[in-house]
Structures are given as structure tokens and as C-alpha cells.
Image: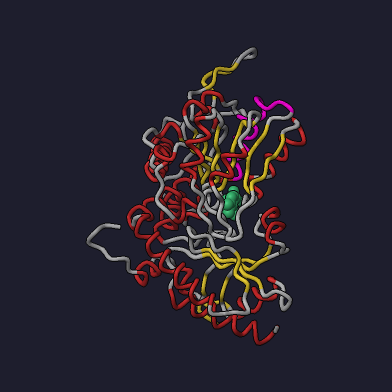
Amino acid sequence: MRDDVPYDVARIRADFPILAREVNGKPLVYLDNGASAQKPQAVIDAVTRAYAEEYSNVHRGLHYLSNLATENYEAVRGKIAHFLGVADERAIVMNSGTTEGINFVAYGWAMPRFEPGDEIVLSVMEHHANIVPWHFLRERQGAVLRWVDVDATGALDPQRVIDAIGPRTKLVALTHLSNVLGTRVDIKTIAAAAREKGVAILVDGSQAAVHMPLDLDDLGVDFYAITGHKLYGPSGSGAIYIRPERMAEMRPLMGGGDMIREVTKDAVIYNDPPMKFEAGTPGIVQQIGLGAALDYLMELGMEAIEAHENGLRDYARERLDGLNWLQVQGRAPDKAAIFSFTLDGAAHAHDISTVLDKRGIAVRAGHHCAGPLMEHLGVSATCRASFGLYNTEAEIDALVDALELCHELFA
Ligand code: PLP
């Protein structure tokens, strides 16, 4: 945030039109940011302008609008690089989000180099987007998945990950921040060890990028995937950072227009990276909307957002700890404002979320696309309240009041 502007959550909330609406006759309390975040007017305006005044296909036309759309679209690559702390924007491949990014690495980098018995190290906290592509490798190429557990607090000891790296490990694939527990992972320590052992590291940054400042050039990873819709941008937008050495090793996943320089009946000459990896008409307007979202975040400042959310985390922890009949999952010392909880033996997560919804409170209930973590926790589902840059302590009070009602109804 600019030093002269304090973090004014009321002013920030006014930037998000949807936050003014009611749900079920109550003011909306939106605590489902981990699934997808709401959009500020600046993003809505950028999307509208891109369609209403500046739309054309990119990279192909020689006319005014095509050049303008290309300029607007390509400017986003630089914004993403800046936001992620990457000096060279050619390391950014734009795509539809984290799921595409991780699959792109699985097909484009891992499949050509994995032999039967080669290993991937991953934590039990991974989202299915960072599990299923590796199961493809297991099913199709005999890869072995090595799972690292979290401890009783939900923290991931970096040393346990490092110890799991063996002579057959080719990739470490980890989340930077758990979408269920909020646990932050010490990627820097793990990445340094992986590099020393000559092992690549892919990081699922879809949650971390939203809650903390990033400096990927310092973090030392090979692949870092982000998704735009959690970053207050449009769905269908996103990017993956790829270390230049790895990019040189990658095979294009999709063939088509834009990623080629020349095609004859007998041969193809590819475009230079990153274009080589962006086949076909991209999500032009989605990415332009993401650019506006990143501008918005950088104007507020990720440090200021993190400080605000850490305040919410501390307050929510204190209030939820006061409910001694509620089981709160995940107490890692380093965590973001994401809380999963259950009412064991009394109510299913879906029932809790239905009661909360009646009071205008949006949370997520289910397995959160984290099957192995649910297994580890010994639950089939949890309720998750995940906070964002516009949430307030008053909304935490509303959540606690509604949970007390659940307790009365179900206990
Ligand atoms: N990884 C994590 C940790 C997530 O929370 C999510 C979304 O919920 C994803 C990956 C998948 O992101 P997307 O569906 O935007 O590709």
C-alpha cells in the first residue's frame, strides 16, 4: 500500500459492488474466497472496456484494434512478472489457471522424461489439481508418488520433504499454502535442497499468491502456477512461471496458431517461448481483467493485504477457539486466514453451510478437492471459512453467531 493511504476496509469494500447485496434477506458475508474471490469495479470496467471499445484477436492483425488488443494483452505478461517478482517476463506463460498450468508441466515436461520407478514427492495437503496429473504419470508411465504427511498442527516440516527426495526423485510438487488449513509451506528451504539434488520443484501458488507478497526470483522454484479468479480477476485467467532452463526442456502441449513461426507440409518452426506454449486464441479479455486485478492488488500492496488478513486470522482464531464444541482443523504456527471446522457427531458440513447460507454467510463445505488431506484428518468433509482482503472482524462475529445457532440446532 502507498505509505500515505491507510488500509481502509470500508473504502475497499465499496470497490466490490457485489458486497453491497443481500442474500436470503441478510447482508452478504462472503467467506468463500478460497474457492473464488469477488471482483472489484476496476476489473469489471476493464473487461467491459476490452469488449466494448478495444476488442479484437491478438498477435495476428495489422489493424488498429488488433494492435491495441495485443498491446493490452501482452502488457499483462509484464504485470504478472512484476507481481510475482520475476525479472524476465518471458518466463511467464499465460493460461486459464492453475489446473491448466500443472497439467501443462505434467504433459509438457514430466511425461517425456519419466521412466517407470521415477518418483514425485508431494504433500498430503495438495489440491486435486496437484495430484491427479501425477496419478496420470503413475498410471501411464509407472511413476511412484511419495507422500509426505503434515504434523498434528497441519504444518509441513521442510526436512521431511527433503528427506523424502531420493535418487529416483525427478520432481517435488507442493502447494505454497493449503486451501483447507491455510498452512504456509517453507518453499524456499525445500527449493534450495531440491536444486542441490538436481530435482525440479513445482509449486501450486493458487492460494499463496492471494495472501502474501511473492518474490519468485528469490524463491528459487522451477514452476509456479497461479489462477486469476482467486486473485480477484476473471475466471479462465492465470499463468505459470517457468524457469528458463526448464522452459528450454519443455515440449509444447498444444499445437495450433500463434505458437508457430512457419508451417509447411513437412515441418514446423516454433515461435520463441513463451509464445511457443500459447497455442490458439488465448483468453484475451480474461487476461486483461487479470491485469486490472493485479494493478488493484499492487496499488493496495500485498504487504498491507497480508497484514490486514493476518489480523483477521488472529481474531477468527480467538473467536473460534471460544467455541469449545467446534473442531477447528489446522493450527500450524504459520498460516493464513483460512479455517476449516466440523461439528463432530452433531452435523454434517453441508448442514452447517446451509444454516450459514440462510444468514447470508457463504462458506464452502465438502472435501475441498483435497481427498488425501481429508483421509489424513479422518473426516469426509469440513466447512471452510476463507477470508479475503475485504473481510472484516464484524463478519467473523456474524460467522460465530451463526455457528452458535448451528450448535443450538444440532447439538
Ligand atoms: N490448487 C489449489 C490449492 C486450489 O485451491 C485450487 C482451486 O481451488 C486449485 C489448485 C485449482 O485452481 P483452478 O481451478 O483455478 O485451476
| Figure coloring | secondary structure
Horizontally, residue 96 falls left or right of residue 47, namely right
State the image coordinates of residue 4 (x, y, percent, origin top left).
Answer: 22, 61
Question: What residue is shown at x 55% (from left), y 59% (from top)?
Answer: 36
Task: Identify the image quadrant of residue 24.
Answer: bottom right
Residue 294 in sight from this viewpoint: yes
Residue 69 in sight from this viewpoint: no
Residue at the outermost left position: 4
State the image coordinates of residue 66 (x, y, percent, origin top left).
Answer: 43, 36
Question: Does residue 309 lie above or below 62 as drawn?
Answer: below
Q: Is residue 115 magenta?
A: yes
Query: Where the N terminus falls, by quadrant?
Result: bottom left
Horizontally, residue 209 falls left or right of residue 354, namely left
Query: Where the C terminus falls, by quadrant?
Result: bottom right
The magenta-colored residue range is 99-116
Question: What residue is shown at x 50% (from left), y 71% (from top)?
Answer: 317
Q: Is residue 222 magenta?
A: no
State the image coordinates of residue 145 (x, y, percent, origin top left).
Answer: 70, 39
Question: Does residue 296 lie above or below 254 as drawn?
Answer: below
From the image, give the main secondary structure of the stretch colored magenta: helix
Question: What residue is shown at x 50% (from left), y 38% (from top)?
Answer: 191
Residue at the outermost bottom position: 408
Horizontally, residue 52 falls left or right of residue 268, namely left
State the image coordinates of residue 78 (x, y, percent, origin top left).
Answer: 38, 39
Q: Nearer the viewer, residue 373 or 5?
A: 373
